[in-house]
Amino acid sequence: MSEFSYDQYQNAVDYIRQQISSTPRIGMILGSGLGPLADSVENATIVPYENIPHFPKGNVHGHKGRLVIGQLEGRDVLVMQGRAHFYEGLSMKSVGFPIRVMQLLGIQTLVVTNAAGGLNQSFNQGDLMIIKDHINFTGLVGNNPLMGANDNRLGPRFPILTAAYAPSLRKLAKDAADAEGIHVQEGVYVSLSGPMFETPAEVNFLRIIGGDAVGMSTAPEVVVANHAGMQVLGVSSITNISIDDPESTQDVSHEEVLEVGQTIVPRLTAILRGVLRRLPNNN
């Protein structure tokens, strides 16, 4: 398990601060196929992950691997255009590293997006799901970014995750969707380690225990963000419907996930812009 010191987080923060003049209070993580929103950031400063000390790179197709820092809807934002994943062989501490950097930069509100498979049988490919809770399988079995020594400067030893996804932000997202005439789902996101898609038996099991969508990211980031005292909004793009029949001849691929993600981007962008407009001025 790779540990990072407070000074290493601060090294990354210092490097980023040297590149920017704004003080963003809103952070955004854009998942597979969802990076184009970052291209609409105004007065943008681009900071490649590879230039930031200790920052995880990630190598998944569809993740550009850079920070985009500027303005959206008149708000100062820091956008992660792509993320690193546990399945790439990184430690959970590395997966959580960008959230620590955001924390020390002063980020107070975090928006996380992902591509996910639909478990809920009422969902359709192309739906958007506001995350109301998650089941963090990797964390439950011991792969948790908070394991190891706790630094009280970063957060408490035992954080409470009852409201891991802030109800106030979920309401803003639903209000923004309603204003744009966009139908959204709401449900529970199941976070697995990946990188394989689930077997039919696993799909049925995850559905039985209350999962509405399943993916390979997000929960570790949200755990760290809550530990850091951030308010979190999560939105899943249902890019495929999980296959629950072992006799099925259907197929799913990462390329399909990216393609469907592109069709979702305009609606997701409209909702996230609406949330930014509705956020209180202290965010």
Image (cartoon, rainbow, N blue to C red):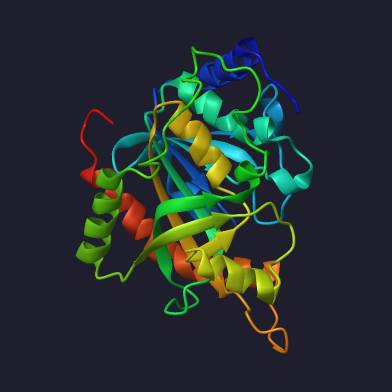
Snapshot quadrant of residue 258: bottom right
Residue at 30 percent across and 51 percent down: it is 170
Vertical arrangement, residue 40 with respect to residue 7, above or below? below
Quadrant of the frame with the N terminus? top right
| Residue 264 x, y percent position in the rendering | 46, 67
Q: Work out whether residue 37 or residue 268 is closer to the camera in this orientation and state it.
A: 268
Q: What is the tally of numbered marks visible in this picture?
A: 0
Vertical arrangement, residue 271 with respect to residue 73, above or below? below
Vertical arrangement, residue 1 with respect to residue 164, above or below? above
Residue 117 visible in rendering: no
Residue 56 appears left or right of 163: right
Residue 260 appears left or right of 193: left
Vertical arrangement, residue 68 with respect to residue 215, above or below? above
Q: Work out whether residue 2 or residue 78 is closer to the camera in this orientation and state it.
A: 2
Quadrant of the frame with the C terminus? top left
Residue at 56 percent across and 36 percent down: it is 67
| Residue 135 x, y percent position in the rendering | 52, 52
| Residue 97 x, y percent position in the rendering | 61, 29
Q: Work out whether residue 210 or residue 22 is closer to the camera in this orientation and state it.
A: 210
Q: Work out whether residue 98 or residue 37 is closer to the camera in this orientation and state it.
A: 98
Residue 27 visible in rendering: yes
Residue 51 appears left or right of 115: right
Looking at the image, the residue that sits furthest to the right is 89
| Residue 208 x, y percent position in the rendering | 52, 69
Residue at 64 percent across and 54 percent down: it is 192
